[in-house]
Image (cartoon, rainbow, N blue to C red):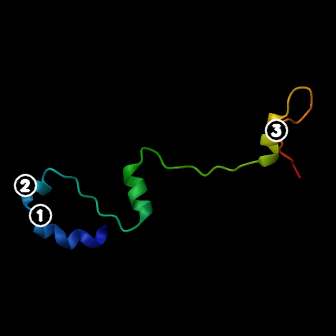
Amino acid sequence: PEENVKDLADIPEEVKKKLELLPAARMEDVLRIALVRQPQAISWDDAAEAAAIVKEDGKDTTGITAH
């Protein structure tokens, strides 16, 4: 966390040289640094999923009721 930067003075320089220290103030900072690509929001369409599950004979055997 960014708040711990002040404590870096307590860590020996030879240890700090072997590390890449990237202070983060928010979780968004952590994700930006840690992830290869940023997550994308998904939208869920229950009706489309239910329609895709219906068997070819037109009978819904899934027990899902679309309203």
Question: Residue drawn at (87%, 48%), measured in percent from left and top?
Answer: 66
Identify whether 4 is placed above or below 30: below
Q: Would residue 14 be found to the left or right of residue 33 on screen? A: left
- Percent position of residue 3, x then y: 28, 73
Q: Nearer the viewer, residue 16 or 56?
A: 56
Amino acid at circle 3: Thr
Q: Would residue 50 be found to the left or right of residue 3 on screen? A: right
Task: Tell me if mark 1 has few (under 14), some (14-19) or many (20+) residues whose alpha carbon lies within 10 angstroms of its own.
Answer: few
Which numbered mark, 1 or 3, is in the foreground of this view? Answer: 3
Q: Which residue is mark 3?
A: 62
Q: Nearer the viewer, residue 66 or 21?
A: 66
Q: Would residue 40 be found to the left or right of residue 56 on screen? A: left
Q: Would residue 50 be found to the left or right of residue 10 on screen? A: right
In the image, farthest residue toward the top: 56
Identify whether 59 is placed above or below 14: above
Q: Nearer the viewer, residue 60 or 21?
A: 60
Which numbered mark, 2 or 3, is in the foreground of this view? Answer: 3
Q: Quadrant of residue 13?
A: bottom left
Rounded to the nearest whole Å, what is the CA distance between mark 1 and mark 3? 60 Å
Q: In the structure shown, which secondary structural element does the residue marked by tag 3 occupy?
A: loop
Q: Which residue is mark 1?
A: 11
Check contact, mark 1 vs mark 2: CB within 8 A.
Answer: no
Q: Earlier in the sequence, mark 1 or mark 3?
A: 1
Rounded to the nearest whole Å, what is the CA distance between mark 1 and mark 2? 8 Å
Question: Residue drawn at (42%, 48%), measured in percent from left and top?
Answer: 35
Q: Earlier in the sequence, mark 2 or mark 3?
A: 2
Identify whether 44 is placed above or below 53: below
Q: Which residue is mark 2?
A: 14
Rounded to the nearest whole Å, what is the CA distance between mark 2 and mark 3? 62 Å
Question: Residue drawn at (76%, 48%), measured in percent from left and top?
Answer: 45
